[in-house]
Amino acid sequence: MDIKQIKKKDVLGAAFFIAICEVVGGLGAIFTMPNIGTWYAGLDKPMIAPPNWIFGPVWTLLFALMGVAAYLVWKKRKIDTRAEEALMIFFVQLWLNVAWSVIFFGQHSLQGAFAEIVILWLAIAVTILRFKPVSLTAAYLLLPYLLWVAFAGYLNFLIFTLN
């Protein structure tokens, strides 16, 4: 596709869905940010734990990819009846993402957060499976998110076992 073929409504639509995802991600940050330099800093962490500064840029990118993916599926809602259900599942997993921040950083529950991130990972996998027949591109856009949450789950488990 030539860049000139991209329609203004597509740019605005994608931007709208990206904004939704970034705002929801910001809700999770409300619980995360106050705890980074205090409670989280005091936890024992595994050697593979990335530096704190990496999480913000990675999550910002992942939420943007989620927004584009959701928009691609939303665009097909009039021609594919599976799109609406796929989007409902997408928004469930998006709220599960926020719930992890609330449980891990807000409630300081390492075990509860690990159980929740397993559910989140499964919800992302189901979202990808539901997006795939509607928009293969949308499904592929969620793969980095699935991988990052798998890594985050592994980190959560290690932090839980170390503390």
Image (cartoon, rainbow, N blue to C red):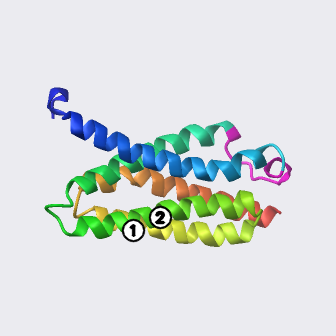
Mark 2 residue type: Gln
* Closer-to-camera residue (25/151): 25
Residue 99 lies, in percent from the top left, at 60, 63
Q: Which residue is mark 1?
A: 89
Say which residue appears at 29% left-offset and 43% top-offset: 13
* Closer-to-camera residue (28/152): 28
Query: Residue 88 lies in what quarter of the image?
Result: bottom left
Give neighbour class at mark 1: few <14, some 14-19, many 20+ (Cα, 10 Å): some
* Label drawn at residue 28: none
Q: How far, Cα to Cα, is label 1 from label 2? A: 6 Å
Quadrant of the frame with the C terminus: bottom right
Say which residue appears at 59% left-offset and 66% top-offset: 117
Q: Which residues are magenta?
A: 39-52
Give neighbour class at mark 2: few <14, some 14-19, many 20+ (Cα, 10 Å): many
- Please say whether residue 48 is one of the residues in the magenta stretch: yes
Residue 64 lies, in percent from the top left, at 43, 43
Q: Which residue is mark 2?
A: 93
Query: Residue 76 lies in what quarter of the image?
Result: bottom left
In the displayed structure, 25 sits above or below 94; it is above
- Please say whether residue 41 is one of the residues in the magenta stretch: yes
Secondary structure at numbered mark 2? helix
Residue 48 lies, in percent from the top left, at 68, 48
Secondary structure at numbered mark 1? helix
Mark 1 residue type: Ile
Quadrant of the frame with the N terminus: top left
Say which residue appears at 56% left-offset and 37% top-offset: 57
In the picture, measured across the screen, residue 156 lies left or right of residue 41, that is left
* Closer-to-camera residue (147/92): 92
Contact check, label 1 and label 2, Cβ < 8 Å = yes
